[in-house]
């Protein structure tokens, strides 16, 4: 409820325009019931809202929205018809059961669910040299943000 949110932060820092206008959105989060939520009181960055067609009904560009959620336990993608997140893969050292346990909604599991493949050398190079040369992901990870 907007008038009585559980918490209210000072601003979105551009998250709304990014989430509203970007062709593809990649979410990186810790996999727990605090970072992931089945339902929220207030939306800063719109995903698929209440399902298929919702982004378009709210005037957002068609065929945009979140593509993937990457957590410390798994990779989740979105069903092209229902727009619902589903488990694509689980990271080494975890399991489907553990991912489901720490997901606060009834997570659907792909028929082709598998262990996440480790990154190839070229992918690591691109992340370290091009995507994140200042190692911000590591800084956020140490602070417990991802």
Image: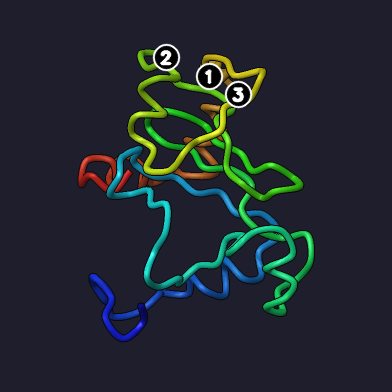
The CA span between labels 2 and 3 is 20 Å
* Label pair 1/2, CB-CB below 8 angstroms: yes
In this picture, is 43 found above or below 10?
Answer: above
**Residue at 45% from the left image edge and 19% from the top image edge:** 96
Residue annotated with mark 3 = 122
Residue closer to the observer: 142 or 16: 16
Residue closer to the observer: 85 or 136: 85
Q: Position of residue 86 (x, y in %)?
A: 58, 36
The CA span between labels 1 and 3 is 17 Å
Label 1 Cα crowd, 10 Å radius (few <14 / some 14-19 / many 20+): some
Q: Position of residue 130 (x, y in %)?
A: 55, 43
The mark nearer the N terminus, 1 or 2, is 2
Q: Which corner quadrant of the image does residue 48 belong to? A: bottom right
Which residue in the rendered view is the most extreme toward the bottom?
A: 3
Residue annotated with mark 2 = 92
Label 3 Cα crowd, 10 Å radius (few <14 / some 14-19 / many 20+): few
The mark nearer the N terminus, 1 or 3, is 1
Residue closer to the observer: 83 or 146: 83
**Residue at 69% from the left image edge and 42% from the top image edge:** 79
**Position of 73 compared to 58: left or right?**
left
* Label pair 2/3, CB-CB below 8 angstroms: no
Label 2 Cα crowd, 10 Å radius (few <14 / some 14-19 / many 20+): few
The mark nearer the N terminus, 2 or 3, is 2
Question: Is the N terminus in the top left, top right, bottom left or bottom right quadrant?
Answer: bottom left
Residue annotated with mark 1 = 116
In this picture, is 38 found above or below 50?
Answer: above
**Residue at 27% from the left image edge and 45% from the top image edge:** 139
Q: Which corner quadrant of the image does residue 13 belong to? A: bottom left
The CA span between labels 1 and 2 is 7 Å
> Element under label 3?
helix
**Position of 128 compared to 144: left or right?**
right
In this picture, is 120 found above or below 19?
Answer: above
């Amino acid at each position: 409820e907007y008038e009585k949110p559980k918490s209210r932060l000072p601003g979105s820092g551009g998250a709304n325009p990014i989430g509203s206008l970007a062709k593809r959105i990649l979410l990186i989060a810790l996999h727990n019931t605090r970072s992931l939520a089945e339902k929220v009181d207030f939306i800063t960055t719109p995903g698929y809202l209440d399902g298929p067609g919702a982004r378009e009904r709210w005037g957002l560009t068609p065929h945009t929205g979140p593509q993937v959620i990457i957590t410390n336990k798994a990779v989740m993608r979105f069903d092209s018809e229902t727009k619902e997140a589903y488990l694509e893969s689980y990271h080494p050292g975890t399991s489907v059961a553990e991912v489901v346990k720490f997901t606060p909604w009834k997570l659907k599991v792909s028929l082709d669910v598998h262990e996440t493949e480790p990154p190839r050398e070229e992918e690591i190079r691109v992340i370290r040299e091009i995507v994140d040369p200042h190692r911000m992901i590591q800084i956020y990870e140490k602070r417990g943000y991802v």
